[in-house]
Image (spheres, rainbow, N blue to C red):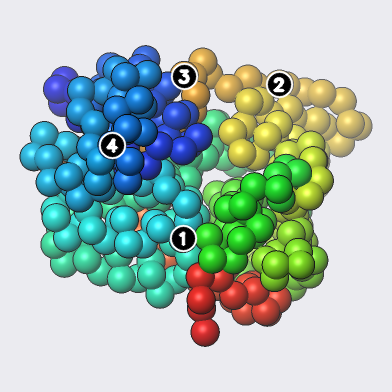
Amino acid sequence: MNSKPLNLGILGTGWIADKMAVTLLEMTCAKAYAVASRSKEKAENFAKKYSFSKAYGSYEELADDPEVDLIYIATPHSHHFENSKMCLLKGKPVLCEKAFTVNAEEAEELIKISQEKHVFLAEAIWTRYQPMRKMISDAVESGVIGTPKMLSANLCYPNIAMQRMYDPKLAGGALLDLGVYVLNFAAMFFGSDIKSVSSHCIKYPTGIDAQESITLEYNDGKIAVLSSSLIVKSDRQGIISGDKGFLIVENVNNPQSFSVYDEDYKLVEKVNCPPQITGYEYQVECCKRAIEEGRTEPVEMPHAETLRIMRQMDSLRKEWGVKLCNEK
């Protein structure tokens, strides 16, 4: 990669923006350049806390700064579309937090703008960019557990009390916040050749999905059982099972290790995650590389895959009768 650090701008000052800022403090290929909030005071406090060079009291000012190389969208799901669209139309590369948008229609429009204007756009689903993704894939493909045929993954946190989680106007619900991770986990290791989908959802009084179970049947006979919830805490494990053993991934949200067991349930090997700052650094590095190569999307999470999973989530919400952000 080019030795010149990437000037990263953060749009929004919530907790996820804090995590990216902490990451940037220890990165060498990218630096904390600018931050924007609807409140100039919030932006200035954030900039001071994390040593950003610039602080803006509007998102438009950030996108207009010619020194900004990439804008990280750190606002709630409900605002991803409008924020990303504004940046793309101003010619600014975008790394947008997951869930990418509220629905596939919004995702399609952003991708169309990106491709027509040849401006980089990526979904910040961090597990797609981390080295553990390839390490797990290599282990599965090595044949150590035999032929993989079943996968399970769960991600659950009791955080329903947060407004952005329970409010349909803020695109709340377990699926867009947590289910997107287990769907991506299945996609990374079992692919996208899905024959059928069945699911069940428990709704919260506000109408959002509080917890769900999703089963994917693949055309080659594989099966994936996925669950997410905003009202309980789970072990966050991902398990890939073959006819000669199984592999357990600790924390599908940010894999810290995976353990391989043989057909006698004996531990064969445990592989730990390589040292990391927060795990967010990999997506920034991948974006920098793609931008320098003149690409409009990252190899690790191409637009087609972002769109496929958005459509998958649209279909699930339609089945459950969950509508967000004034959807018809």
Check residue 78 in the rendering and tell me which mark sits there, or answer none. 1
Label 2 or label 3, whichever lies nearer to me, is 3
Describe the element under mark 4 as helix, strand or loop: helix
Q: How far across and how far down the image is residue 315, in percent?
A: 59, 76
Q: Which of the two residues, 45 or 50, is positioned nearer the viewer here?
A: 45
Q: Which of the two residues, 21 or 308, is positioned nearer the viewer here?
A: 21
Callout 4: 10 Å neighbours few (<14), some, many (20+)? some
What residue type is disc 3 on? Ile
Check residue 270 in the rendering and tell me which mark sits there, or answer none. 2
Q: What distance separates the C-alpha of mark 2 from that of mark 3?
A: 21 Å
Label 1 or label 3, whichever lies nearer to me, is 1
Q: Residue shown at 82%/23% (left/top)? A: 267
Q: What distance separates the C-alpha of mark 3 from that of mark 4?
A: 29 Å
Q: How far across and how far down the image is residue 109, in percent?
A: 30, 71
Drawn side of residue 85 relative to residue 255, left or right: left
Q: Residue shown at 31%/56% (left/top)? A: 83
Drawn side of residue 270 relative to residue 184, left or right: right
Q: Decide: marks 2, 1 in contact (CB < 8 A)? A: no
Drawn side of residue 86 relative to residue 179, left or right: left
Describe the element under mark 3 as helix, strand or loop: loop
Drawn side of residue 314 relative to residue 204, left or right: left
What residue type is disc 1 on? Ser
What residue type is disc 4 on? Lys
Q: How far across and how far down the image is residue 230, in percent?
A: 73, 51
Callout 1: 10 Å neighbours few (<14), some, many (20+)? many
Label 3 or label 4, whichever lies nearer to me, is 4
User: How many labels, in total?
Assistant: 4
Residue linked to disc 4: 40
Residue linked to disc 3: 277
